[in-house]
Structures are given as structure tokens and as C-alpha cells.
Amino acid sequence: MIPFLPLNRINAAYEPELSEVISRVAKSGWYLRGNETEKFESEFAAFCGMQHCTGVASGLDALTLIFGAYKILGKLKDGDHVIVPANTYIASIMAISKNNLIPVLVEPSEETFNINTAHLTKNTKAILSVNLYGRQADVAKEKNLLLIEDCAQSAGIKPTGDAAAFSFYPTKNLGALGDGGAVVSNDEELNNVVRALGNYGSQKKYINDYLGFNSRLDEIQAAALSVKLRWLNEDNKKRGEIAMRYIAEIKNPDIILPQKEGNNVWHLFVIRCKNRDALQKHLFENGIETMIHYPIPPHLQKAYKDGNLLYDKLPITEKLASEVLSLPIHQAMTEEEIETVINSLSKPLQNQKP
Ligand SMILES: Cc1ncc(COP(=O)(O)O)c(C=O)c1O
């Protein structure tokens, strides 16, 4: 079976260094907010071309803390509208809702899967642009609007918004050995509030300025991420090479391949097929594991059954949810695996077993 994302094989490439740094931290006796985290934060800020970085416990927390910090700083208030793509992973939207802000769901482009133009409402105060599948969304900064970038799926792309949230969930392009995330920005004030909010609202020990959370990146994850960060550009390059081969060599009239153009770190390689479920079954029977990102859009989830979302109709989002299929793509893929994926897909669907 060609696995969708074999994390054991992927992480084996960073050995023995990964095990060495884990052991170093274990023996150090210091596990949170120490040298490893400080080092990773400054490396990751520099990598992103930003001045500040705060490590947090997850991508969802990174987004939640950004919105929370903007509220504390008086740049957002309860009930403000935040534009967000309707086809994102639900965490993007939850971060908005959790802060008593109103998500305004916008349809993506069928070609890029991303939003490009903002549909502003009177109360719109911010745009949460999502670099879905690793492709940077083409969302320009609007005057008087905050632009927050959800970079959970796009580690390796330089963020351009006022603040950006990253996830280091193990499957991400820069994946930790557990949960992790980061907020990056050029805004020192924002960074200070995010850092405090993720530490019980405290900037100074036992002085609590805000009703905060406990959301910190730990020393073991930070040390592991520092090791993997050194290889991220090279790893992303390999993903890009596989993507270009898939685009050039998969020949199938029943499949729509993703756009080649764009600033993309190919977190996922997502094709579209009207007969998606049959194709997925066929590929599985041919030893290829695929996944669907995502089968049920957020507005149709039970979590939002009571509303609190603003949208009109979302036919593109709903169509994409029924057609998208993610193929295996990662830096540890063998030539044989790549060829098998290409060959198995380069057959018209009608010739495949039902
Ligand atoms: C687009 C997007 N935003 C936010 C998140 C949340 O990140 P995490 O899983 O680290 O909380 C994810 C990933 O799961 C994601 O794909």
C-alpha cells in the first residue's frame, strides 16, 4: 500500500539528530519557555521574514490568540465581521467564533481553491485569508482592514498579512512530534499580547493582565522543529517536483488537476473528479491511500447548526467538497510510488472496476 503520509518514514530522515535533541531536552530539566523555544522562535521569525514569533500549543490556538489579542488592543470588538473562505478547515472559522466575532463565509475560486476578492459587509473589520493546500491566497491588504493569514498549511511561504498563524501538527509541512503552532508578525505590541494571553494573561510572573489561556510550545517540540526547519525549503522543493510531475504526467479526462502557477508549498495535492468516491475506491484497491480535505464544509457541520455564520449560498464550496481528492505527496516518496500514482490515475474512469 502506498500510504498517504507515512510520518515514521518522513521523520526517519532527521535521525539521529531528532532523538539527540529530544534526549538533550529530557536531561536538561527545563521543559517550557526555555532556550529551545526562544531559539526556534527567533529562527522561525527570520525564516518567515518577520520580526516576531511566539510559539503556542496549536494552529487553532495561534488563530484564536491573534483574534483575542486584537480585541484586547481595541482593533476588533464583539460582533465584528471577519471574512473567511467557506471551504477552509473548520479551525479557521472556530477561532473567529470563539472570540465572539462573526465569520462571513466567502466562496473560493474553483481554480485555486482560495478566495481572491473580499466580499465586504458594513461591519467587516478583518479578513482571514487561508493558504489552503499550501497555496498562498491572493488577498490584498485593504485599507482599514486587518489581514490575518492562516498559514497552517503553508509553512515555507512568507506571510504578508498583519499577523500569521502556523500549525505544527505532525502532518504539516513543518510537523512537530505532537501539537504545536506559532504566531508571527511585525507588530511588537500584538506579539506581546499574544505571548501573554497564551500564558494565563501574564507578562510578568504572578501578574495577570488578561483572562488568558495556557497555550505554549514546549521545549521538546521547539527543539525538534529547529532540526526540521533547516530542511524545510529542501523538503518543500521535493514536494514541488512531485507536484510538477503529477501535473505533467497524469492524463485523465475525468480529472481536474490543480493549477501549476502560484506560490505553493504543496501541502496537499488536490485533484477534482465528479466520480470522486469511485475513484478513491479504485485507487485504494490499487494500493494507493488518498484522503478528502474536506468532505463536509464547516457551514454544514453540527457545530454550526445554530447559525452564527453569515453567508448566502455556497454552491462552489459544496461542489468542491463532493469532488476533491488528495493524492499522496511528501518528501520521502520513492520514484516507484510516484510512478504508481501517475499510472493508476492515467486511465479513464470508465475503464476502471466499479
Ligand atoms: C487551514 C487550517 N487552519 C487551522 C488549523 C488548525 O491547526 P491545529 O491542528 O494545529 O490546531 C489547521 C489544521 O489542522 C488547518 O488546516
Image (tube, grey):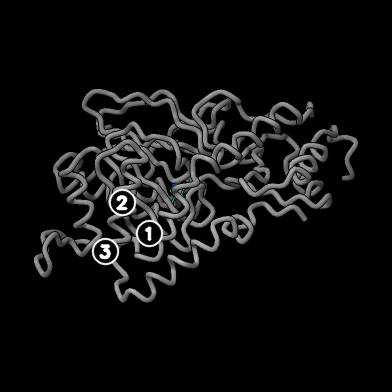
Q: Position of residue 23 (x, y in %)?
A: 43, 72
Q: Position of residue 197 (x, y in %)?
A: 21, 57
The circle drawn on residue 297 is none
Q: CA distance from mark 2 to mark 1?
A: 8 Å
Closer to the camera in the image, 1 or 141: 1
The secondary element bearing badge 3 is classed as loop
Q: In the image, what residue occupies the spot 31% across and 51% down?
A: 41
Q: Is residue 97 visible?
A: no
Q: Position of residue 314 (x, y in %)?
A: 51, 34
The circle drawn on residue 222 is 1
Residue denoted by label 2: 41
Q: Is residue 6 visible?
A: yes
Q: Earlier in the sequence, mark 2 or mark 1?
A: 2
- Which quadrant of the rendered structure holds the C terminus? top right
* For residue 93, above or below residue 260: below
Q: CA distance from mark 2 to mark 3?
A: 10 Å
Lateral position of residue 169 relative to residue 185, left or right: right
Q: Amino acid at mark 2?
A: Glu
Q: Tell me the crowding category of disc 1: few under 14, some 14 to 19, or many 20 or more residues within 10 angstroms, Cα based.
A: many
Q: Amino acid at mark 1?
A: Ala
Q: Earlier in the sequence, mark 2 or mark 3?
A: 3
Q: Position of residue 284 (x, y in %)?
A: 78, 51
Q: CA distance from mark 1 to mark 3?
A: 10 Å
- Verify CB contact (< 8 Å) between mark 2 and mark 1: yes
* For residue 175, above or below residue 132: below
Q: Amino acid at mark 3?
A: Arg
The secondary element bearing badge 1 is classed as helix
Residue denoted by label 3: 33
Closer to the camera in the image, 280 or 309: 280
Which quadrant of the figure has residue 155? top left
